[in-house]
Each structure stands twice: as structure tokens, then as C-alpha cells.
Amino acid sequence: MRIAFSGTAHSGKSTLLKSFLYTWKNFVTPNKTYRDLLKEESLTHSSKTTSKTQERILDFMLDQLQTYDKDSKVAYDRCPLDNIAYTMWCHDKNKKGFSKAFVTKQIQLMRESMRFLDIIFLCRYNEQAGQNTNNENNLREKDTSFIKEVDNILYSFYKQYMSNPGANIFFPKDDTPCIIVLPDDQQRRIDLIAEYINSDGELFGEEESILNPENINELERLVKEQQGALAREETEKELHKKFGLGNHDQIK
């Protein structure tokens, strides 16, 4: 089982990863993360990121994903989907180096990398999480407007996934991870994850699925909560307009 916790700064994903590893002790997480890469190579990042930084982070993540096979039990703090969200934000802001050709190439690489993940748990921006964060280093972004814009891009990916999970711009056909948007509360997040992953770190069988009658009401409540959060259809349309990508991801 290969899972990733995705989300912007101040989404509570790093705290959630710690709680997950405490609860599911048979999982591991890589010792080195993209944050270590930023420090080692003194790369500018977040709202000040560059095409070099985004390329290096994606390459690092791709190499790391291929280290673990499908029988591994590994949990990642972010994945290539996060990287592409920041890259697309830079393109939208007309930042130097983020041409359509560059972004398209990065999307193609990210899309193929999705084959190396089984579940992505998406954490939305949470203002409370930002207030409770201990900013012990300079790696954490503090620009709320920037954070919300990236959060919206990530959510638009989820909307694309929901509209066509079999194949689209960002996810490969017939081999894409399940994407689950988590509620804000940390304990509710753990509780929902436990509906998908059993104590042995495996997916529940159909007879134990979240879709059984006992869990339908909770599922409906979560769906309504997600639908009420933000409607991002227009953002999705804009992504198509900006990059002109079809299902074959060809650069024109």
C-alpha cells in the first residue's frame, strides 16, 4: 500500500502523517523529503519558486516513488501532484521559465508517476492549522492568498478525477490512485482513513468497505461537506484553456 498525504502549507498534512504512522505502525515514510532537498541545494521555493526548483523536486519525488514496490507499506508527505499544482500556479502568474512547453512536460511526468501510488489523501487549507503551526524554519509559506490559490488548484485536480477517473490530463488510464478529500478535523481524518485501511495496512475488502450500509450515512455527509466547500468547475475549464491539453497530452 503506497499512500500520499497531499495539500498546501497549513493543511495539517504533516501532523496527519505523524498521527497516521503512530496509528499504523507497519507503515514507513522516507527519511529524506523534498524539504531536505530545498535545504541541501539552497533552492528558492513556494511563492518564490523557480522552474529549476520545481524540476528538481519532481525528479526527486519520481525517484523516491520508484524505490517502493506495490507490496510496500509507505506513506509520503506530498507527491508529484502537489509539485504540479505549484508549477501551474507559476505559469498562471507568468513567472519566468514556466512556459507552456515546460509545464506540459512536467504534467506528463507527473501523470505517469501516479501509477506508483494507491491512495492520495487530500488535505484542504485550514486556517486553524496555520494558526497552530510552529514555524521553526523558513520553509513554511505564510502568504495566505498564495496558499489558497494553490489549494484551489489541488482541488481542481480532484474535480477532474471525480469527473473522469479512468483517464484525463492528470491521471493515467486504468492505473490511477484513489483520491480522497479529508475533513478538517484531525481525529475525523484518522477515522475516515480507518474506513479504507485496516489495522494490517491493507485495503478493506468489499464486505468491510466504507460503502456498506452502516457507513452510507457518514459517506453522504462527507460528500455534502466536500460539495459545499468550493465549486471549482470554472478553474478546471481554465486549466484546459491555458494548456490546450487533451487526453493524449500533446504539445502543439
Image (tube, rainbow, N blue to C red):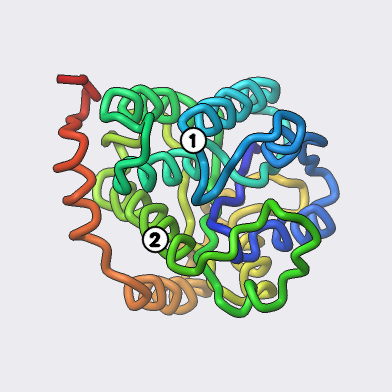
Going by the image, does 55 lie left or right of 175? right
Could you say which quadrant of the image residue 232 lies in? bottom left
Q: Residue furthest front?
A: 96
Q: Which residue is mark 2?
A: 149
The x, y position of residue 11, in whole percent, is 58, 65
In x, y percent, where is residue 29?
Answer: 77, 40
Percent position of residue 204, x then y: 61, 51
Q: Nearer the viewer, residue 211 or 1?
A: 1
Q: Earlier in the sequence, mark 2 or mark 1?
A: 1
**Dot 2 amino acid type:** Glu
Residue drawn at x 49%, y 35% is 50
**SS at mark 1 in the image:** loop
Q: Determine the image quadrant of residue 196.
A: bottom right
Question: Mark 2 near mark 1, Cβ–Cβ under 8 Å?
Answer: no
Per the image, the residue denoted by label 1 is 50
Residue 80 placement (x, y as % from top left): 51, 36
Whether residue 7 is situated above or below residue 62 in the rendered picture: below
Camera-nearest residue between 24 and 147: 147
Residue 168 lies in quadrant: top left
**Residue 165 or residue 201, whichever sits in front:** 165
Q: Which quadrant would the N terminus be assigned to in this image?
A: top right
**Amino acid on which the number 1 mark rests in the picture:** Thr
Residue drawn at 66 percent across, 57 percent down: 140
- For the C terminus, the image quarter is top left
